Image: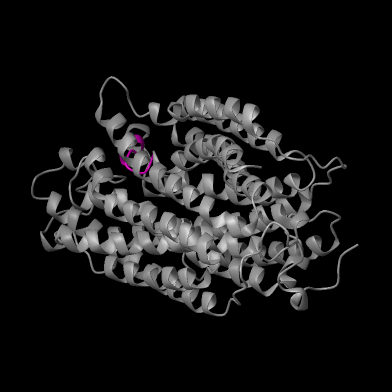
Amino acid sequence: MSHRQVLEALSGLLLGLFVAVLSSTVVANALPHILRDLHGGQTAYTWVVTGALLSLTAATPIWGKLSDLVSPKKLVQAALVIYIVSSALAGLSQNTGQLIACRVLQGIGAGGVTALAQICLAAMVPPRERGRYSGYFGAVFALATIGGPLIGGVIVDTDWLGWRWCFYLGIPFSLVAIVVLQRTLRLPVVKRKARIDYLGAVLITGAVSLLMIWITLAGDSYPWLSWQTAVMVGGGLVLAGLFVWAEGRAAEPIVPLGLFGYRTVTLASIASVLVGVGMYGATTFLGQYFQLARKESPTMAGLLTLPMILGLALSSTVAGKLITRYGRWKAYLVAGAGLLTVGFALLGTVRDDSPYGLLAVAMAVTGVGLGLTMQNLVLAVQNTVPRHELGTASSTVTFFRTMGGAMGVSALGALLSHRVSGHLNENLAAAHLPAGATGGGIPDLRALPAQVVPMVTDAFGRGVATVFLVSAPFALLAFLVVLMIREVPLRTARQDAPAEPAAREPARS
């Protein structure tokens, strides 16, 4: 494809990616308002985010495997249709259970769009040129992350719209993306019978779900050391073991174990899990911090996160161009993981009354770190595997990133709930007020007595800081893992052989 043809097709893919990312970010600042309207608490807050990430995690490798067998163009259009239907249903939700269920369906569609956009790009351009276009993906990701919270905040703050338009908003964009892709995307179709590893998908979803439910409820509904913990953790580990067993015997496994014969794939997958914890887990709670610790409106909460998003957009775009020019990518990965660690450590020091200048610097550093790591982990893997495994390998990295994110949101959400509750009870006890003075659930600062508001903002400020502080070690581990990845110069269009033939296991039949 010529540069012009790539850009034309890329416009549809980027539009689809925009709405997929928007599905997560548009609710970031609106969730406190949504859950007050639907009478949900902190656990529901966590699961509205986690439900979408969990289904996205399970669906991503299936979409990736399908792309190796049938038309990626039809698949990405099907994913957009699923997104449209689920978004319409989410906007009609009458309680938190319905909303979470619709978010699960939405995650399936968003997972397909996110994974297939990368796969289609890999099919259109060689690895050496891919960095240039990956920068566009990073920029669109940043734009959706910027626009999502801002748009969601404006919608919630506009009386004649209402929070339901947070879900309706992506529907027209998705329809346009389907039409653009139909007119511009031209990819070869592999015509062979698809055999999907449904057993593997069920097993990995069950394993992750059990562990996430345990993390969410332990310490609240039952003690950490209890028979419930033993059953859930033990069951999760058994299902994970069965998943590995099933993948070794499946004709078309969703996560081919042979891919891990590549050192780069193995290390990039581990790093993706660790980055996912920080990327999804920590940043999910920024909207809560600004609204409940600093008493900002949803719209202002979106504006105040701009330093992080601009850092992400600039770093991913500039790095993409430099990678295309020089063919080297490892230095950006190392720098990104290092900056992510520093950014989370700085955010771990914030309180409800911290100077915004400190917050802005910490968010900018975090954003640059994310921009340098997310797309380049996928790029490193795509440069390693042969062309016929591009779809599976790309979706495998995305799978581990979203799995880390799903478990991170669940664990950090439980941690936040526990810490906020503890700090709030301490503050109320010191003021000789009853523990239920805030009414439970997500508090509405405008409806609370004036003397209670500083206690709530202090509790949320300290609680969210703990979340970021706990995320920093995960970023540090990602930094150490990235250091061990062996850099191989990006291949050109004429090169098709794997970049790490010595590390490859014997070919599968």
Please provide percent x and percent y for residue 7: 55, 39
Using the image, determine if residue 44 lies above or below residue 462.
above
Q: Please identify the residue farthest to the top as the structure is shown.
A: 160
Q: Which residue is at a point 43% across and 54% down the rendered structure image?
A: 317
Out of 486 and 93, give the one closest to the viewer: 486
Instruction: Reply yes or no: does residue 457 show up in magenta.
Output: no
- Of 188 and 403, nearer the camera is 188
Q: Please report the residue visible at 52 percent of the width from the left and 44 percent of the height from the top.
A: 52
Q: Position of residue 168 (x, y in %)?
A: 45, 26
Residue interval drawn in magenta: 27-34
- Residue that appears at 14% across and 59% down: 353
Residue 30 forms part of the magenta stretch: yes
- Residue 121 can be seen in this image: yes
Q: How many numbered dots are placed on residues in this image? A: 0
- Residue 225, x across and y down, in percent: 50, 71
- Judge from the rendering whether residue 162 lies leftward or rightward of residue 124; answer left or right: left
- Quadrant of residue 106 in the image? top right
Q: Residue at x 37, y 39 (%)?
A: 148
Q: Quadrant of the N terminus?
A: top right
Seen in the picture, residue 331 relative to 369 is either above or below; the reply is below
Rendered image quadrant of residue 272: bottom right
Q: Position of residue 455 (x, y in %)?
A: 16, 56
